[in-house]
Image (tube, grey):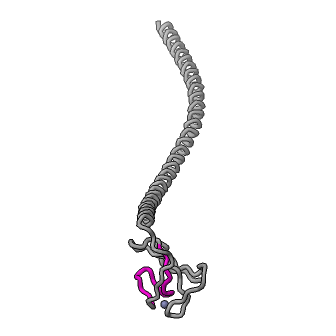
């Protein structure tokens, strides 16, 4: 069985047909082909095996109708159905193109979203690190504050001690002077 390479819309070569085999003038088995001409839409005929429905070229002139001529009404209905099918196919192709375009847009948004999520995760990590560092430094600061308080107590104590010794030295000096004065008198 040999299939035509041309699209089905232009007529498919059928070799597996009922009844006796037909042969074209080339001596080859004649295929049954569906006509898509405006006048004989859907009507089948036997033609040359080397018939090319794309450019209507054929090797020999063999041509025999398989179907009886359709009534006007049948032709009208077939034509209407065929046109509707063509329109629907165009619409379907358009919808498929739109879906493809939308998928591409969605993919771009997904990629952009992933990048933004990555950036946000990095920021969250940075903030967490900053929070940890803040806690550590706050603890250190608290420690330093306590050390500072102890140091202040020590400094105050030393200052009081120094003042006491200075006061004592001054008292001794004053007493010493009085003693000298008394001896001088
Ligand atoms: Zn032929």
User: Which part of the image, by quadrant, shows the N terminus?
Assistant: bottom right
Give above or below for 142 relative to 107: above
Q: Which residues are magenta?
A: 43-59
Residue 80 visible here: yes
Q: Is residue 54 magenta?
A: yes
Give above or below for 88 relative to 69: above
Q: Main secondary structure of the magenta part?
A: loop
In the displayed structure image, the side of residue 156 where residue 72 appears, left or right: left
Give above or below for 153 relative to 5: above
Image x and y of residue 165, in percent: 56, 18
Image x and y of residue 27, in percent: 53, 93
Image x and y of residue 126, in percent: 53, 45
Q: Is residue 38 magenta?
A: no
Residue 97 visible here: no
Q: Nearer the viewer, residue 100 or 83?
A: 83
| Residue drawn at (46%, 88%) of the image | 62
Image x and y of residue 141, in percent: 56, 32
């Amino acid at each position: 069985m040999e299939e035509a390479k041309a699209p089905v819309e232009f007529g498919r070569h059928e070799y597996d047909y009922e009844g006796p085999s037909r042969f074209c003038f080339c001596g080859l088995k004649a295929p049954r082909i569906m006509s898509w001409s405006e006048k004989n839409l859907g009507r089948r005929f036997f033609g040359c095996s080397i018939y090319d429905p794309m450019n209507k070229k054929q090797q020999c002139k063999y041509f025999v109708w398989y179907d009886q001529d359709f009534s006007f009404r049948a032709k009208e209905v077939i034509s209407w159905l065929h046109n509707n099918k063509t329109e629907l196919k165009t619409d379907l192709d358009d919808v498929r193109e739109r879906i493809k375009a939308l998928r591409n847009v969605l993919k771009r948004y997904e990629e952009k979203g992933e990048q933004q999520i990555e950036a946000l995760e990095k920021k969250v990590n940075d903030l967490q690190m900053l929070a940890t560092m803040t806690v550590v430094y706050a603890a250190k600061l608290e420690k330093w504050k306590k050390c500072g308080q102890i140091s202040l107590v020590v400094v105050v104590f030393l200052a009081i001690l120094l003042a006491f010794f200075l006061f004592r030295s001054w008292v001794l000096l004053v007493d010493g002077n009085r003693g000298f004065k008394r001896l001088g008198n």
